[in-house]
Image (spheres, grey):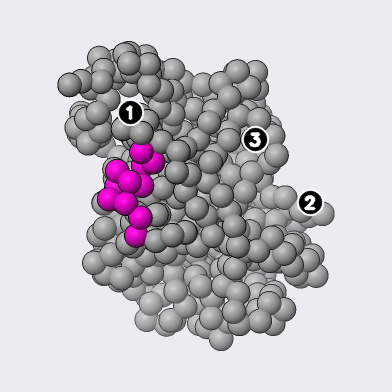
Amino acid sequence: MTNLISKVDVIVTSPARNYVLLKITTEDGVVGWGDATVNGRELAVASYLRDHLAPILVGRDADRIEDTWQYLYRGVYWRRGPINMAAIGAIDLALWDIKGKSLNQPVYQLLGGKVRDRVLAYTHATGWETSELLESVDEVLGRGLRAVRAQSGVPGLSTVYGVTRGIKRYEPAKRDLRPLEEEWDSSAYLRHAPKALAEVRAHIGDEVELLHDAHHRLTPIQAARLGKELEPLHLFWLEDLTPTENQEAFDLIREHTTTPLAVGEVHNTIWDCKDLIINQRIDYVRTCVMHAGGISHVRKIFDLADLYQVKGAPHGPSDVSPLTMAASVQLGMASPAFGMQEYMGYPEQVGTVFSPGYRLVDGYLTASDAPGLGVEIDEDAAREQPYDQAYLPVARTLDGAITNW
Ligand code: KDG
Ligand code: MG
């Protein structure tokens, strides 16, 4: 019995922000959807899918998900990389969607069934002034969330990751023809962030989980200092302290602090995470279910993590679509190592294209029980809202040199 792929379509849509959608149709007329959004580089992955992968997918058996994964991963020869792995991830999600729809089961059933009833989620609170941040935290908690990521402005700087002055909702990519240039000063950040986070902890009490993202900006010794200073606040995690091209840096950080560490949103294979996991350099691995090659690959990362009591906590900003979010929740229901799901939320207009099926209730996400990933896509609405150029910012230190954004 075969279920051959007959058609592969790529749609780049922009309902308030850009998404790359993949639609795979089988000869039996079953449709599976994938997401291949790489924020700020959408057209590269769309072209890769359309020009190189679609032609070789047509005629393949949609049921052979792992075989297709191996075919694409090994077959490219130029392995890994964000564009390649997001494209493979999108195909993988679409094939799991098709398998679920063909067998009339939600994907979590095909992954072995539920190991939990619901998946703990956190969302973002953001405010330039600490008073604004506290208001934002209150708004998040008012929606029933039990875990919150807090990001504040830094005195003396005009821009900071995760915060927009005077605007409640933060979006990392800006619609423009060139990246916005932001400024950064680690000394000013290190003076201010512990004070702002201490005020948040005092405001919310001990029971709400508190998280913070340093967004790859510190040196290892600065990171160690921040982790140590924040220890009394009992953070759930401190994220992306230093860029992980140098993974040994985490040994130095670990020597100095017991604050739990989260890393991995820019990683795209198990090979990028392996040493961090097996050397217990981190506590949470944040690979995104689409950017790291789909459900088929990320479940292997989380199974490896499970051996070392490292938890999976997938990336879930607004720049991964509700389709990826749905896939992540499906995996979370069935993966023993799953610890937490980032759920940044979406601009309202995103709802014109995606009806995601999952639900956020009392701070937990629950997967849809509908067949496949459980997401409805309004294809006409997607095509009516075409791509709109947008870039992630770059950052410069106060002397004008480019630094990590
Ligand atoms: O596109 C970049 C964003 O996905 C990233 O800046 C968000 O760090 C992020 C997070 O933890 O959500
Ligand atoms: Mg992050």
**Residue 285 at x, y = what percent?**
38, 60
Question: What amino acid type should be assigned to the residue bearing mark 3?
Answer: Gly
Residue at left 22%, top 30%?
A: 64
Question: What amino acid type should be assigned to the residue bearing mark 1?
Answer: Ser
The quarter holding residue 137 reads bottom right
The region drawn magenta spans 105-115
The quarter holding residue 185 reads bottom right
The mark that comes first in sequence, 1 or 2, is: 1
The mark that comes first in sequence, 1 or 3, is: 1
The quarter holding residue 14 reads top right
**Which residue position holds label 2?**
167
Element on which disc 2 rests: loop
Is residue 113 covered in magenta? yes
Question: In this rendering, which labeled residue sits more in front, label 3 or label 2?
Answer: 3
**Which residue position holds label 1?**
102
| Residue 323 numbered tag | none
Is residue 345 covered in magenta? no
**Which residue position holds label 3?**
351
86 lies left or right of 276: right
Element on which disc 3 rests: helix
Residue 276 vs 39, above or below: the answer is below
Q: Nearer the viewer, residue 261 or 379?
A: 379
C-alpha span from label 3 to label 2: 21 Å
How many numbered discs, if any?
A: 3
C-alpha span from label 1 to label 3: 26 Å
74 lies left or right of 267: left
**Residue 328 at x, y = what percent?**
43, 48
Question: What amino acid type should be assigned to the residue bearing mark 2?
Answer: Ile
